C-alpha cells in the first residue's frame, strides 16, 4: 500500500505542476494581449486626435493661435464715470483687463490704450445705472465693452486681437 500512496502523491504533484504552468502561460498571454491592446489604443487615439485637430485647423474651427495661453492686459487706472444726476446712483468705477492670445498684440494694445479708454468711458457714461444692478446687465455691458474695444483695435490695427474683456472690479454708488 505504501507504494500506491507514493504513486498517488506523485500523480497529484505531477498534475498540479502542469495546471500551474498552464495558469502561468494563460496569465502571460493575457498580460501581453492587454499591453499590446493598450499600446494599439494609445497610438490609434493619438493618431486620430492629431488628424481631427489638423482637419479642424484646415476648416478654421481650431487654430494654433487658440491653443496659446491668454495674456491679460490691464487698462489702468480704473474707469470712473458720472451718471445723470436724476438717479440715486451717481458714479461707476470699473477696473478692466483685456485678454489676447497674441503675445505681439500686448504691446499694440498698450499703445492704443488712450483710444480704448476714450471709447469705454463714453460707453460707460451712457449707461442707465438701474440696468447694471443685476448680472444680466453687467454681462450685457461687458459684451458691449468687448465689441467697442474690438472696434477700436480693428480701426487702429486692422485686427480685433482682443478675445475677451474682464471686469476685475465693479463699484456703483
Image: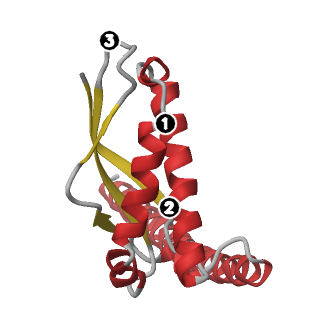
Residue marked by disc 1: 126
State the SS at label 1. Answer: loop
Q: Mark 2 highlights which residue?
A: 149
Pointer 3 with pointer 2, Cβ within 8 A = no
Q: Identify which residue is drawn at 72% across, 71% down.
A: 61
Residue 45 place in picture, x, y as percent: 63, 74
Q: Are marks 2 and 1 in contact (CB under 8 Å)?
A: no
Distance (Cα) linking label 3 and label 1: 16 Å
SS category of the residue bearing label 3? loop
Q: Does residue 3 lie above or below 39 as drawn? A: above
Pointer 3 residue: 88
Asked if residue 53 shows in the view, the reply is: yes
Q: Which quadrant holds the C terminus?
A: top left
Query: Of 169 and 152, which appears nearest the observer?
Result: 152
Q: Position of residue 53 (x, y in %)?
A: 67, 78
**Viewer-proximal residue among 23 and 167:** 167
- Which residue sits at x=44%, y=63%? 11
Between 170 and 87, the one lying in front of the other is: 87
* Vertical position of residue 82 compared to residue 16: above or below: above
Task: Quote the CA–CA distance across marks 3 and 2.
Answer: 29 Å
Q: Is residue 91 left or right of residue 11?
A: left
Query: Callout 1: few (<14), some (14-19), or many (20+) C-alpha neighbours within 10 Å?
Result: few
- Give the mark nearer the N terminus: 2 vs 1: 1
Which SS class for mark 2? helix
Q: Is residue 33 visible?
A: no
- The front one of 64 and 128 is 128
Earlier along the polypeptide chain: callout 3 or callout 1? 3
How far from the left and from the top, in percent, is residue 9? 35, 59
Between disc 2 and disc 1, the foreground one is 1
Q: Name the residue at 42% across, 23% down.
A: 129
Q: Image check: 30 left or right of 54?
A: left
Amino acid at each position: 500500500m505504501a507504494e500506491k500512496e507514493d504513486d498517488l502523491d506523485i500523480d497529484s504533484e505531477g498534475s498540479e505542476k502542469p495546471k500551474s504552468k498552464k495558469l502561468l502561460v494563460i496569465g502571460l498571454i493575457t498580460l501581453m494581449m492587454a499591453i499590446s491592446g493598450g499600446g494599439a489604443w494609445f497610438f490609434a487615439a493619438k493618431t486620430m486626435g492629431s488628424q481631427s485637430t489638423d482637419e479642424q485647423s484646415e476648416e478654421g474651427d481650431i487654430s494654433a493661435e487658440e491653443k496659446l495661453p491668454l495674456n491679460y492686459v490691464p487698462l489702468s487706472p480704473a474707469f470712473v464715470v458720472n451718471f445723470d444726476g436724476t438717479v440715486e446712483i451717481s458714479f461707476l468705477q470699473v477696473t478692466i483687463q483685456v485678454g489676447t492670445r497674441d503675445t505681439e498684440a500686448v504691446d499694440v494694445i498698450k499703445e492704443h490704450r488712450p483710444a480704448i479708454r476714450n471709447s469705454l468711458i463714453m460707453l460707460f457714461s451712457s449707461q442707465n445705472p438701474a440696468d447694471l444692478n443685476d448680472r444680466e446687465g453687467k454681462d450685457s455691458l461687458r459684451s458691449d465693452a468687448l465689441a467697442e474695444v474690438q472696434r477700436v483695435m480693428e480701426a487702429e490695427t486692422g485686427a480685433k486681437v482682443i478675445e475677451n474683456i474682464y471686469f476685475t472690479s465693479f463699484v456703483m454708488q
